[in-house]
Image (cartoon, grey):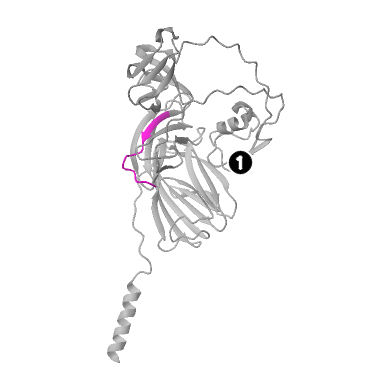
Amino acid sequence: MKNWTRWVLTLLLVAALLPWASPVAAQTPTLGSWLAQYWNGNSFTGEPLLQRVEARIDHNWGTASPGARIWADNFVTRWTGTFSVAGGNYTLRTRTDDGVRVWVDGSLVIDDWNLHAATERKHDMALGAGTHTFVVEYFEASGDAVASFDFYPQGRGPAAVRISPESGAAGTVLQIEATGFWSGANVTVSLHQEGHSAITSGVVAANAEGKLWTTLTVPTWAPAGTRWYVAATADALSGYSGWFTVGGAPAAPTPPPATPAPPAPPAPGTPSVCGSTYTVQRGEWFYLIARKCGVSSAALLRANPQIINPAFLYTGQVLQIPAVSAPAPAPAPAPAPATVIALTTVNLNFRVGPSTAYPVIYTIPKGTRLNVIGRGPDNWIKVEYAGRTGWVAGWYTTITGNLAALPAASY
């Protein structure tokens, strides 16, 4: 009996020493990324049940769970990240459902630890040049779960990145447009696989309007089903694209659509096709909504004086849509220009100006027929492609038609 008792006690001791769940693997975020830790319940005590490195805090889980072992309701999250800034006055911005708290270098600067629907909070503060540590804590009680945080220099607003296409095979060339930066900003544009650091990156200068266009190529080894995104960063100002999903054939460039017969102009005061109000949908931006509703962006901005920066809209925001004004009479048509066609002999960069110093808009595939609309310096030619005008190196094309008959194009 004594041996049996000793054996049972030994088993109980071993069981007590064994962990009830496998430990969370230690992870260390790099400068500019976040260590995300998740707990069930409403307390940050004990080991987190889920721990991972996240490139950004921008989540809309809805009624789903953030990840394995975490409940869809009644959980808390802590993000910790260190970022290098140029110094100056910054705006910190959160949007959460439910509560959030933000510390900067140990000081509490946003305290909104309350139950509420998706709500935005902002805090302006000065940050000295160098590195600063941010801690963001969040709790979800029930219903939809939303958590986002970013910070940017005051007066600039958040940046935005759009990519095309949004799915395709490994090796697809992504066409990238980034907005919201300042004139001449040196913007680092990088391609990331979900949950990984940058695979490839480059620096592109923004134009006078704070915009840039470039391309990045999804690796040919990218596994089917993986998701990728593009990040654009200058100082502490960052923007992120939606997902590109690997799978299927690469999307071919969209040719310019045929010009339909112009519709009859609307009478002044005619309601727009969207009605008098419009609710912003996920992934939409200001100028897209203006085109969708058939009104000018200037008229849409005048009708919504509460919008300080049209580059930032949030899902569910309600916009006032102005009535459609009668368009100005169309000018008399100009004489038809000479028809000149360029056939690309290589995969050719399509640029905003006639030299390699200008940013790349797209990469035009070899064998594409282009309509030439003007001549430039040093054998550069101005062409139309995918609904846009830009420049290509003429010596990488075969020209059909009288190029000399075309006018010298401005840029």
| Residue located beneath label 1 in the image | 317
**Residue 93, image x and y in percent?**
52, 43
Residue shown at the point (57%, 56%) measured from the top left: 143
**Residue 8, image x and y in percent?**
32, 84
Quarter of the image where the C terminus is located: top left
Residue shown at the point (27%, 89%) measured from the top left: 3
Side of 110 relative to 327 (left or right): left
Task: Determine if residue 215 is in view.
Answer: yes
Q: Within the magenta stretch, is there residue 260?
A: no
Side of 270 relative to 44 (left or right): right
Disc 1 residue type (three-letter): Gln
Magenta part, dominant SS: loop
Kindly indicate the quadrant of the structure image that contains residue 88. top left
Q: Within the magenta stretch, is there residue 223?
A: yes
Q: Residue lying furthest bottom in this view?
A: 1
Q: Residue lying furthest top in this view?
A: 405
Quarter of the image where the N terminus is located: bottom left
Residue 408 vertical position relative to residue 177 in the rendered view, above or below: above
| Span shown in magenta | 213-225
Q: Nearer the viewer, residue 143 or 86?
A: 143
Q: Nearer the viewer, residue 324 or 152?
A: 324
Task: Determine if residue 186 is in view.
Answer: no
Q: Nearer the viewer, residue 255 or 214?
A: 255
**Residue 144, image x and y in percent?**
56, 53
Q: Nearer the viewer, residue 91 or 242?
A: 242
Residue shown at the point (47%, 49%) measured from the top left: 103
Kindly indicate the quadrant of the structure image that contains residue 192. top left
Q: What kind of element bears circle 1?
A: loop
